[in-house]
Image (cartoon, grey):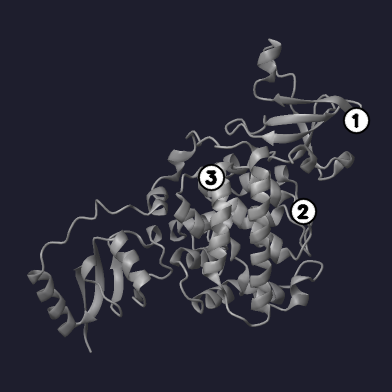
Amino acid sequence: MSKEIIELPAEQLRLGIYVSRLDRPWTDSPFLFQGFAIENDEELQTLRRLCKVVYVEVSVAEAEELKSAARKSPAAAPHDSDPPDPLEVLSTNPAALVNHVPVKDSVPLKTELPLAETAYGEAKHAVGAIFDNLRRGSGLDVPHLEIVVGSMVDSVFRNRDAMGWLARMKSKDDYLYGHSLAASVWALAFGRHLGLDKETLKSVGTGAMLLDIGKTRLPTELLKKAGTPSAEEWGMIHAHVDHGIELLRAAPNVDQRVLTMIATHHERLDGSGYPHKLKGDEIPLIGRIAGIVDCYDAMISERSYAGAKSAYDAVRELKRLSGIAFPAELVELFIQAVGVFPTGTLVELNTGEVGVVIGQNRFRRLRPMVILILDGQKQVREEFTKIDLLTCDENTGKSEATLWIRHGLERGAYGIDPKEYFL
């Protein structure tokens, strides 16, 4: 049967019709494949929201029928009144956000931490249940996960640092649990910094939490094996992307953006990623976001085949990879969102004093706010002093910098538990 490609107003799309081309680049849409048959109402509504017209492949008879219907129907209403997809808008020029001023937190860190702990604990329980159920062969309860992610979104909107602080304090649980939860936290912090709304953030946070669900189909001994995997084992590990897509497609009511994140979170800007070696703009924005948060948390986590990097070293590695594996402007924005010396990090100053980072200066990332715990001789100070490294030198009247961070310290250094200085 001969086929014909015709232009069709998005309002006239229907289930089962084959979409050959959009009125915009495929990379500006959440769809995984360039060409697909519309399978459900969600895909239908997404196309109607994003596009004014699409190009469909139909039989000659269907083409005449659709053209006739188009001539008889009134002109399509403009889409100008429809709210644009925030990710679609952002994808056109993320570099424009590099110098934007972030929205201030509505509550201080100390106030938010108890609320964040509750939301974090619920999310941790939900993640554990999901991975346990999948390992036993049960299905995936995405709607329940979206509820707990919604509580995390609310926390991140109140204070950008509380969830991140808890993620950095994570215990050495099952790597999949801890990594999935932390990746979601970084995605939420990143998304808030990018100016995404709560509903979009919920999808981004849910997708990040599910990036590695495909690994539940891999042998446990492979995931816990010490040392670098062999070439054959790497092949098995890489297959977790396809496994994850299969698991999500079998679950009801899954947001297309979640699927896109899982499908593209290991693709890289230079085409060196997997599974399809996409490059440049072939990788949707949401996939690039997923790749950065996944890579960052993997670097700062203990894995069976690699030790954890400090947050500072992880940021340096991301900077090295910018323009190669990840877009430079997105790396810059991510570093703004999480900080070089993140909140909760132990640091030693050039004076030998030791303190805990309690807040960020977004555009002077090496000069955060710190509470000093130990003096230069590593003795507990009689009075804990809060200083802002951005302004402390101004207060001395000196033109040159007198205080700066010499280096970050590992968690628990000098017996200091940062939690004691927040809760």
Question: How busy is the neighbourhood of tag 1: few (under 14 within 10 Å), some, or many (20 plus)?
Answer: few
Taking the spot 68% from the left edge, 60% from the top edge, the residue there is 179
Q: Is residue 4 left or right of residue 110?
A: left
The front one of 209 and 152 is 152
Taking the spot 58% from the left edge, 60% from the top edge, the residue there is 148
- Dot 3 amino acid type: Phe
How many numbered badges does the structure rendering display?
3
Q: Is residue 249 left or right of residue 365?
A: left
Q: Tell me if residue 373 can be seen.
A: yes
Q: Which mark is residue 378?
A: 1
Which quadrant of the view contains residue 43?
Answer: bottom left
Point out residue 322 in the picture as x, y percentages from the top left corner. 57, 47
Which is more N-terminal, label 2 or label 1? Answer: 2
Q: Can you say whether 374 is above or below 295 in the image?
A: above
Taking the spot 13% from the left edge, 80% from the top edge, the residue there is 65
Q: Can you say whether 28 is above or below 421 in the image?
A: below
Q: Is residue 158 left or right of residue 168?
A: left
Point out residue 192 in the picture as x, y percentages from the top left corner. 52, 46
Q: Find disc 3 in the rendering and name its residue.
A: 157
Q: Find disc 2 in the rendering and name its residue.
A: 308
Nearer the observer: mark 1 or 2; the answer is: 1
Which quadrant of the view contains residue 313?
Answer: top right
**Pointers 2 and 3 in contact (C-beta within 8 Å):** no
Q: Tell me if residue 323 can be seen.
A: no
Point out residue 100 in the picture as x, y percentages from the top left corner. 47, 35
